[in-house]
Amino acid sequence: MIDWRDIRSTNKTIKSYMTAFNEMAKLCPKVNPDCNSSNQRIVLPTQWEPTFGYNTEHLLPYITNIHVDYERLFEFGRPKLIAPTYTMWKSSWFTLEWQIEFPFEFYGWKAASRHQINDDEETPIYETTPENMCVWMESTIILSSGSWPYKAWGLKDWKSKYTEILSFLDNSPKVVAKYRMEVEKANTEVLKWERELEKVATLTKIPTK
């Protein structure tokens, strides 16, 4: 637990922050604070995103975290009927967002202290620890793909583009395993959905005789 912070610990924190910021700037020199209002109001924001229109393809190998989402295709145990006019059918059923993390440290001071190091109450011996500056907590600057999904695929293209989708982050070593697992889970959902729709179609077909 930290007892206090002063100009020296604050300067050291800022130096650590700027080291992380410079690493981010090497990869992406044009950034804006993330749209989170509290993040925008602080002097040293910890959440950043590339400026609008900035080409981010070269950042993909450095991704450290991803968020993948897809809308479930079942409702109350039944397959959903998805019209061709739905956005999830046309363009954005499976979506991807990414983050790159740059660690830095907050510093503060611990007050001086002492504790007894022997068991003799008559002639106690104490060990004194002077006040010292140390890491108070670890944090990260986060560069993210922004408020909107970085990449999205519609349900209508899932089968025709499955190989492309599955291999999209093959050059992102820190997240490729997690990403492929999420794609495979989504594919399982699609295959189950198609099977159940076929059953429904069979059951509701009107006999010709």
Image (spheres, rainbow, N blue to C red):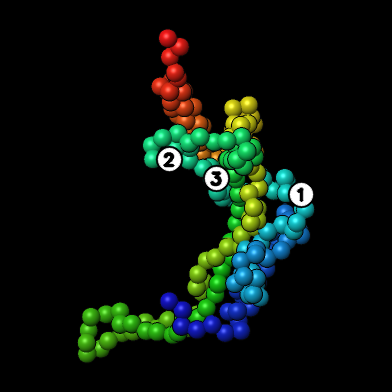
- The residue labelled by disc 3 is 68
Assess disc 2: are there few (<14), some (14-19) or many (≥20) residues with their C-alpha within 10 Å of its C-alpha: few
Judge whether 166 appears above or below 27 on screen. Answer: above
Mark 3 vs mark 2, CA separation in Å = 20 Å
Residue 174 seen in this snapshot: no
Residue appearing at x 65%, y 44% in the figure: 151
Assess disc 1: are there few (<14), some (14-19) or many (≥20) residues with their C-alpha within 10 Å of its C-alpha: few
- The residue labelled by disc 1 is 55
Q: Position of residue 1 (x, y in %)?
A: 43, 76
Q: Quadrant of residue 84?
A: top right
Residue appearing at x 50%, y 69% in the figure: 137
Assess disc 3: are there few (<14), some (14-19) or many (≥20) residues with their C-alpha within 10 Å of its C-alpha: some
| Identity of the residue furthest to the front in this view | 209
Helix, strand or loop for disc 2: strand
Give, as a three-letter code, the residue at label 3.
Val
Residue appearing at x 71%, y 63% in the figure: 32
Residue nearest the viewer, comparing 15 with 148: 148
Judge whether 130 appears above or below 179 on screen. Answer: below
Q: Position of residue 100 (x, y in %)?
A: 62, 54
The mark nearer the N terminus, 2 or 1, is 1
Q: Position of residue 163 (x, y in %)?
A: 61, 28
